[in-house]
């Protein structure tokens, strides 16, 4: 079934026993990952999480249904998180939804899926699945989103605080949520003891945590500007910012561009695609320029390159920051070679 934001949040927060699959699709991968965390919290701190990806399901279509029906090693709660899920996982999801038994819920993060694709249609048609599209909010929704997340943590936004938080997070819902959690802790706020969030509290602990700087680094990479990129990466390193969110932010931008390029290949104009819900309102102009610079082949190669860098960084004993910087600069130089 297709659900709205309130319905998906309530279902994940309660780990609704009637739902086997929570499909979180669309280009806002950060927002999808943040929603997936809700299921983990609902399952409890001792719950066992099984991590799979779309490639694993393509090679073994029965594995997902088998994992969903299996008991935890220690007999406790268990759930499955699938990342990078694509259309190739259709048969695996069909087996899951039609299986006789599946006691462990599955949350799937699928940034490359289109709402018109067969996987999304499968989830919408199933009574035991929920499908939710994760898109970057438009300007009119930005303040409302920040205020809603703040309210969940017992914070009442005032004046321009909601917009200020959203801008500081660069439109990234996961960063926004973590920042709000930090502010709620500072103000000792909770749903049962609400507190007012003002500019003074944000000034005290709500530093911009390098988010604007991360955005500048990502835009420099997309624009093919290695000189500016190098400067911004140096600033991030000095501030102690982890390279992982930079790489993930870069992948999100590249994937959005790839999706928009596919629409353009189908006959849409650049002007029309950048006005849709997949483009953050502050990024419309830069997205239009990027669509004129990047082609589908280069985007696919850049996405794979950055993802490989992230996997390498997360392995033991690697030169993390160096690998991240090299991946970002490789993206910028790929644009230069196209000029």
Image (tube, rainbow, N blue to C red):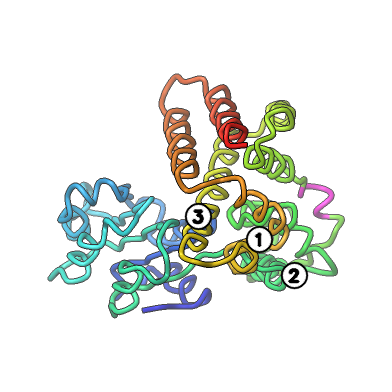
Q: CA distance from mark 3 to mark 1?
A: 13 Å
Q: Which circle, 3 or 2, is nearer the viewer?
A: 3
Q: Which secondary structure, mark 1?
A: loop
Q: Is residue 193 visible?
A: no
Q: Which residue is mark 2?
A: 156
Tell me the magenta residue range: 201-206
Q: Which mark is residue 145?
A: none
Q: Which secondary structure, mark 2?
A: strand
Q: Which secondary structure, mark 3?
A: helix
- Residue 308: x and y in percent read 42, 33
Q: CA distance from mark 1 to mark 2?
A: 25 Å
Q: Earlier in the sequence, mark 3 or mark 1?
A: 3
Q: CA distance from mark 3 to mark 2?
A: 27 Å
Give the image quarter of residue 1. bottom left
Residue under the point 61% across and 34% down: 332
Q: Circle 1: is it few (<14), some (14-19), or many (20+) Cα within 10 Å? A: many
Residue under the point 57% across and 63% down: 278
Instruction: Name the dominant secondary structure of the magenta segment.
Output: helix
Q: Which circle, 1 or 2, is nearer the viewer?
A: 1
Quadrant position of the C terminus in the picture: top right
Q: Earlier in the sequence, mark 3 or mark 2?
A: 3
Q: Circle 2: is it few (<14), some (14-19), or many (20+) Cα within 10 Å? A: some
Give the image quarter of residue 215. top right
Total labels drawn: 3
- Residue 204: x and y in percent read 82, 48
Q: Earlier in the sequence, mark 1 or mark 2?
A: 2
Q: Which residue is mark 3?
A: 29
Kindly give the residue lying farthest to the left in the view shown: 100
Q: Is residue 133 visible?
A: yes
Q: Which residue is mark 1?
A: 280
- Residue 93: x and y in percent read 24, 63
């Amino acid at each position: 079934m297709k659900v709205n934001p309130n319905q998906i949040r309530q279902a994940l927060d309660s780990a609704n026993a009637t739902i086997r699959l929570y499909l979180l699709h669309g280009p806002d991968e950060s927002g999808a990952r943040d929603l997936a965390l809700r299921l983990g919290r609902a399952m409890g701190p001792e719950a066992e999480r099984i991590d799979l990806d779309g490639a694993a399901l393509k090679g073994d279509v029965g594995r997902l249904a088998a994992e969903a029906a299996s008991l935890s090693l220690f007999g406790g709660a268990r759930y499955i998180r699938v990342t990078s899920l694509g259309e190739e996982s259709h048969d695996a999801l069909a087996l899951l939804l039609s299986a006789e038994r599946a006691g462990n819920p599955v949350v799937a993060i699928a940034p490359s899926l289109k709402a018109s694709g067969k996987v999304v249609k499968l989830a919408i048609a199933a009574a035991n699945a929920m499908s939710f599209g994760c898109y970057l909010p438009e300007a009119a929704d930005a303040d409302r989103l920040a205020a809603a997340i703040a309210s969940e943590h017992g914070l009442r936004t005032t004046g321009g605080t909601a917009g200020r938080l959203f801008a500081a997070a660069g439109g990234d819902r996961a960063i926004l949520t973590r920042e709000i959690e930090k502010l709620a802790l500072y103000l000792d706020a909770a749903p049962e003891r609400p507190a007012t969030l003002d500019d003074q509290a944000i000034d005290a602990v709500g530093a911009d945590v390098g988010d604007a700087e991360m955005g500048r680094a990502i835009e420099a990479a997309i624009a093919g500007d290695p000189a500016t990129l190098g400067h911004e990466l140096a600033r991030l390193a000095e501030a102690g910012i982890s390279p992982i969110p930079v790489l993930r932010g870069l992948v999100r931008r590249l994937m959005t561009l790839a999706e928009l390029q596919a629409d353009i290949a189908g006959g849409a104009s650049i002007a029309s695609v950048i006005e849709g819900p997949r483009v953050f309102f502050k990024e419309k102009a830069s997205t239009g320029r990027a669509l004129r610079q990047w082609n589908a082949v280069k985007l696919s190669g850049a996405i794979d390159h950055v993802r490989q860098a992230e996997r390498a960084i997360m392995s033991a004993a690697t030169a993390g920051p160096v690998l991240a910087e090299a991946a970002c600069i490789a993206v910028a130089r790929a644009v230069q070679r196209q000029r």
